């Protein structure tokens, strides 16, 4: 019985010199014109020799007969361009707009971004987005750095819950602790 799905290796059409370099941490957003690729890491280095992301824009078009073609997207020299980034998010918000948020600008020193940009694919122009309020405190998703062991995160959350518990629960716990230390069973909590 034949399998309903199978992987097929596509053949590249077009200019091999104007193609995308191998990379990771980029986004590939489906649009009517093709798939728009932005950013990522491809082995480039900054002036200090550290790995550096890029702000490349390419369009991937799938052709007939199992072919594909990459084409660089040329922007107007006067237009704004977002800072280079990797590990960012991108989503199509309309038929001709892509919203890009956050990512890493540098790993050494560590520099994460919390900016937003919209690429208008009808004219291939970037527009910076301004948010009403910046994330503050430790409750914003961007403010919490996801490092360390999961157990460490659970311990932090548990200790925070203990600190936020009602005074009544704390006083019962203190009374139970005092009675167990002194051996007095009158103040014990069942």
Image (cartoon, rainbow, N blue to C red):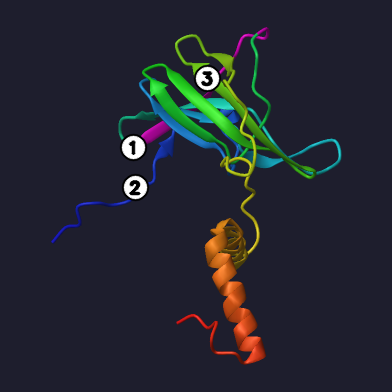
The reply to whether the magenta stretch includes residue 74 is yes
Quarter-of-image position of residue 61:
top left
Who's the residue at 64% across and 10% down the image? 79
- The disc placed on residue 52 is none
Who's the residue at 68% across and 26% down the image? 83
169 lies above or below 24: below
As drawn, the residue found furthest toward the right would be 48
77 lies above or below 177: above
Quarter-of-image position of residue 170:
bottom right
The residue beneath circle 2 is 8
- The disc placed on residue 118 is 3
181 lies above or below 16: below
- Whether pointer 1 and pointer 2 mark residues with C-beta atoms closer than 8 Å, the reply is yes
Q: Nearer the viewer, mark 3 or mark 1?
A: 3
Image location (x, y in percent) of residue 97? 44, 18
Q: Does 69 sit left or right of 42 as displayed?
A: left
The residue beneath circle 1 is 66
Q: Is residue 15 visible?
A: no
The reply to whether the magenta stretch includes residue 104 is no
- Estimate the spatial distance between the alpha carbons at disc 3 and disc 1, rounded to whole Å: 31 Å
| Label 3 packing within 10 angstroms: few (<14), some (14-19), many (20+) | many
Q: Earlier in the sequence, mark 1 or mark 2?
A: 2
Who's the residue at 52% across and 13% down the image? 124
| Label 2 packing within 10 angstroms: few (<14), some (14-19), many (20+) | few
Image location (x, y in percent) of residue 189? 49, 80
Where are the magenta residues, as a range? Answer: 66-78
SS at mark 1 in the image:
loop
Quarter of the image that includes the N terminus: bottom left
SS at mark 2 in the image:
loop
Image location (x, y in percent) of residue 102? 60, 34
- Estimate the spatial distance between the alpha carbons at disc 1 and disc 2, rounded to whole Å: 8 Å
Quarter of the image that includes the C terminus: bottom left
């Amino acid at each position: 019985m034949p399998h309903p799905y199978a992987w097929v290796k596509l053949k590249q059409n077009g200019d091999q010199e104007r193609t995308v370099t191998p990379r990771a941490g980029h986004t590939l957003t489906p649009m009517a014109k093709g798939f728009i690729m932005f950013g990522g890491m491809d082995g480039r280095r900054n002036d200090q020799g550290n790995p550096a992301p890029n702000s490349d824009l390419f369009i991937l078009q799938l052709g007939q007969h199992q072919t594909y073609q990459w084409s660089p997207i040329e922007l107007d020299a006067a237009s704004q361009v977002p800072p280079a980034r990797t590990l960012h998010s991108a989503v199509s918000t309309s038929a001709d707009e892509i919203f890009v948020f956050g990512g890493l600008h540098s790993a050494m020193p560590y520099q994460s971004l919390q900016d937003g940009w919209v690429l208008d694919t009808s004219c291939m122009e970037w527009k910076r987005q301004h948010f009403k309020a910046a994330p503050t405190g430790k409750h914003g998703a961007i403010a919490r750095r996801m490092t360390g062991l999961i157990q460490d995160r659970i311990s932090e959350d548990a200790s925070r819950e203990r600190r936020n518990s009602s005074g009544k629960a704390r006083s019962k716990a203190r009374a139970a602790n005092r009675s167990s230390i002194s051996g007095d069973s009158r103040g014990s909590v069942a």
